[in-house]
Image (cartoon, rainbow, N blue to C red):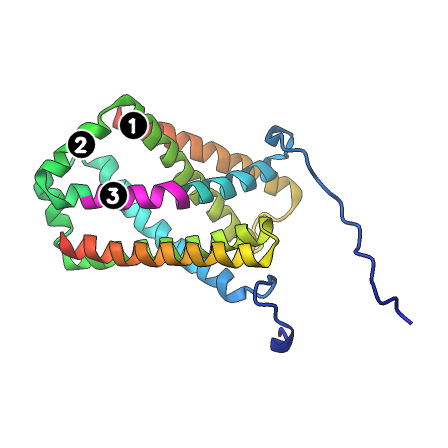
């Protein structure tokens, strides 16, 4: 276990929860992608009515949102790792991390409005 | 008594930015990272814009349909398709490495080759499909 008192706010090396979340979200994305890619590779073109009908199905809405939220959580962990690797000054790193987090939160809200507004 | 100012350990530095010098697992790894960052920056907003546009109105749907019929746009789409698929296949490889499948040098090199080939072949398949 990591001693909590020694934790550095912008440090690395204690991210097993992130590690697990990154993999769980990855599996969700792979499963959803396989279904969607299979669907569009077999079906020849989609018209507007079919496209709207798909997004009116409550089950599809929930699965689509689950997929997008997985993308955002997965991206947050990945981008945070990249920032920890390349951006050393703590202030800039935290600033960029906050910007990424706010962007992804905004994307989450936007996704809900798009899917349930359809 | 330990010295008050410890000298930082000298670490090896690697500044060769020519990716082609990397061994296959390294190439798959750096592509995994680059595609991840590129998708975060461009694909996420693009997908949301297209979803909003195509679901908003029939006019918007038809507008996006004509945009996607342009060859340059198809090429950009294929670039993102490769990014997504490479990231996906490389990710599955990491999941297998996590459960200690293929951690030896030779299998790791072979699986890296397979990942790179699968990403490219699947992209070509999608390219044939959308053209």
Which of disc 2 and disc 1 is earlier in sequence? 2
- Residue beneath the point at 42% across and 37% down: B83
Alpha-carbon span between mark 3 and mark 2: 13 Å
User: Above or below — where is A22 with respect to A46?
Assistant: below
Query: Does label 2 lie on the same chain as label 1?
Result: yes
Quadrant occupied by the N terminus of chain B = bottom right
- Residue beneath the point at 60% across and 55% down: A89
The x, y position of residue B125, in whole percent, is 34, 29
Q: Which residues are magenta?
A: B40-52
Which of disc 2 and disc 3 is earlier in sequence? 3
Please give left or right for residue B86 compared with residue A44 in the image. Answer: right
- Residue occupied by mark 1: B73
The x, y position of residue B38, in whole percent, is 43, 40
Instruction: Quadrant for residue A115, please give it.
Output: bottom left
* Residue A52 seen: yes
| Mark 3 or mark 2, whichever is nearer to me | 3
Chain letter of disc 1?
B
- Residue occupied by mark 2: B65
* Disc 3 secondary structure class: helix
Alpha-carbon span between mark 1 and mark 3: 15 Å
Quadrant occupied by the C terminus of chain B = top left
| Mark 1 or mark 3, whichever is nearer to me | 3
* Disc 1 secondary structure class: helix
Residue placed most toward the observer, A88 or B29:
A88
Please give left or right for residue B93 compared with residue A33 in the image. Answer: right
Mark 3 Cα-neighbour bin, 10 Å: few <14, some 14–19, many ≥20? some
């Amino acid at each position: 276990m990591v001693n909590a008192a020694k934790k550095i706010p912008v440090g690395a090396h204690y991210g097993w929860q992130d590690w697990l979340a990154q993999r769980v979200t990855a599996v969700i994305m792979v499963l959803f992608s396989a279904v969607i890619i299979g669907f569009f590779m077999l079906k020849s073109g989609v018209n507007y009515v079919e496209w709207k009908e798909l997004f009116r199905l409550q089950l599809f809405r929930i699965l689509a949102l689950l997929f997008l939220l997985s993308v955002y959580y997965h991206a947050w962990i990945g981008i945070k790792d990249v920032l920890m690797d390349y951006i050393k000054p703590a202030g800039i790193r935290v600033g960029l991390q906050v910007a990424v987090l706010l962007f992804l939160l905004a994307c989450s809200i936007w996704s809900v409005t798009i899917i349930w507004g359809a | 008594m330990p010295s008050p100012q410890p000298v930082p350990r000298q670490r090896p530095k690697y500044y060769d930015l020519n990716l082609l010098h990397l061994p296959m697992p390294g190439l798959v790894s750096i592509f995994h990272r680059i595609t991840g960052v590129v998708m975060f920056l461009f694909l996420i907003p693009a997908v949301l814009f297209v979803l909003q546009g195509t679901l908003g109105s029939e006019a918007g749907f038809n507008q996006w349909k004509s945009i996607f019929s342009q060859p340059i746009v198809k090429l950009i789409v294929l670039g993102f398709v490769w990014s997504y698929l490479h990231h996906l296949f490389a990710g599955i490889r990491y999941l297998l490495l996590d459960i200690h499948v293929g951690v030896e040098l030779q299998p790791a090199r072979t699986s890296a080759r397979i990942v790179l080939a699968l990403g490219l072949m699947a992209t070509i398949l999608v390219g044939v499909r959308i053209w």
